[in-house]
């Protein structure tokens, strides 16, 4: 009798267990579906972010195509157009800026900011900034960096000095150009030599002094740069 009662009890427990399993399973499936849905949403959100980021940059191929097709009727001493040229020469070559006003303008999806200054009632370009991080090739070697900025430097320029920037931020080259001196002869840059300009390249994060994320050429340089280490 006891054996029969015990067996019945075991069978009853097994039966209850079998009946309860199906009711628990949907909860597990719902949790898995919810998790899968969240993962799908995360993937969709990531795709949207990637698409938005891709729209914020310009490809190197697009830049090369613009440069190949670009032309200007304005006089220039640079391979393309560059510092010392007029703001109108850049607009003639690259088209209207994406945005900007006064002394600061952005071209090519913010890849190329320009700094301009009025000299004898003419807006002259005093700075050309190339931000590689705004392209699909966000870090360049020193050779690539200098080759790219050279397109905006007068061909008569001569390198006269080189410095490592403080705290390992990058490098800076100093040049002199008769063309720059002539353009800005009547314009005073305090503590700076007529005809002088600098090219400053900034290291990419974690590049260990191998890759650069941006470069800027700016008219004027200090005679005795402070905080910089000579080569």
Image: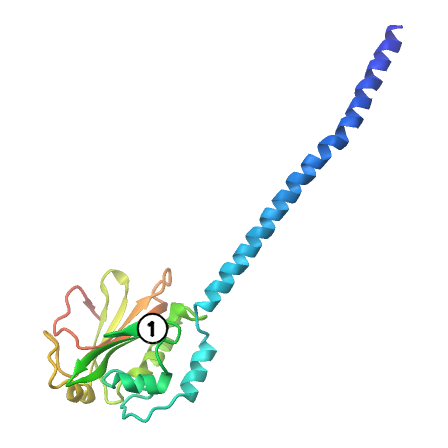
Image height of 214 relative to 180, above or below: above
Residue 118 in the image, given as x and y percentages of width and height: 18, 81
Could you tell me which quadrant the N terminus lies in?
top right
Name the image quarter holding residue 175.
bottom left
User: Residue at point 42% right, 71% down?
Assistant: 135
Residue 112 in the image, given as x and y percentages of width and height: 34, 75
Tell me if 146 is positioned left or right of 55 in this view. Answer: left
Tell me if 87 is positioned left or right of 25 in this view. Answer: left
Closer to the camera, 165 or 119?
119
Q: Is residue 5 visible?
A: yes
Number of marks drawn: 1
The residue under label 1 is 99
Image height of 89 relative to 165, above or below: below
Name the image quarter holding residue 95.
bottom left
In this figure, which colouring scheme has been used for the structure? rainbow
User: Residue at point 19% right, 66% down?
Assistant: 228
Residue 20 in the image, given as x and y percentages of width and height: 76, 27
Residue 136 in the image, given as x and y percentages of width and height: 46, 70
User: Residue at point 24% right, 60% down?
Assistant: 167
Image height of 88 relative to 32, above or below: below
Q: Which element type, helix, strand or loop, lies under badge 1?
A: strand
User: Residue at point 28% right, 86% down?
Assistant: 88
Closer to the camera, 204 or 218?
218
Could you tell me which quadrant the C terminus lies in?
bottom left
Image height of 78 relative to 198, above or below: below
Q: Is residue 139 visible?
A: no
């Amino acid at each position: 009798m006891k054996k029969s009662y015990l067996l019945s009890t075991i069978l009853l427990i097994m039966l209850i267990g079998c009946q309860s399993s199906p009711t628990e399973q949907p909860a597990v499936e719902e949790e898995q579906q919810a998790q899968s849905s969240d993962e799908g949403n995360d993937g969709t959100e990531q795709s949207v972010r990637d698409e938005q980021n891709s729209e914020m940059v310009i490809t190197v191929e697009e830049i090369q195509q613009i440069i190949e097709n670009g032309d200007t009727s304005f006089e220039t001493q640079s391979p393309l157009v560059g510092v010392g040229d007029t703001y109108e020469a850049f607009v003639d070559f690259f088209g209207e800026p994406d945005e900007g006003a006064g002394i600061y303008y952005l071209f090519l999806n913010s890849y190329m900011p320009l700094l301009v200054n009025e000299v004898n009632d003419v807006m002259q370009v005093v700075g050309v900034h190339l931000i590689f991080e705004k392209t699909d090739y966000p870090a360049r070697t020193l050779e690539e960096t200098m080759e790219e900025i050279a397109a905006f430097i007068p061909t008569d320029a001569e390198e006269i000095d080189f410095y490592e920037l403080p705290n390992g931020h990058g490098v800076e080259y100093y040049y002199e150009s008769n063309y720059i001196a002539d353009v800005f002869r009547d314009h005073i840059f305090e503590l700076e030599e007529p005809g002088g300009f600098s090219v400053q390249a900034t290291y990419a994060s974690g590049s260990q002094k191998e890759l650069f994320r941006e470069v800027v050429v700016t008219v004027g340089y200090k005679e005795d740069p402070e905080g910089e280490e000579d080569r």
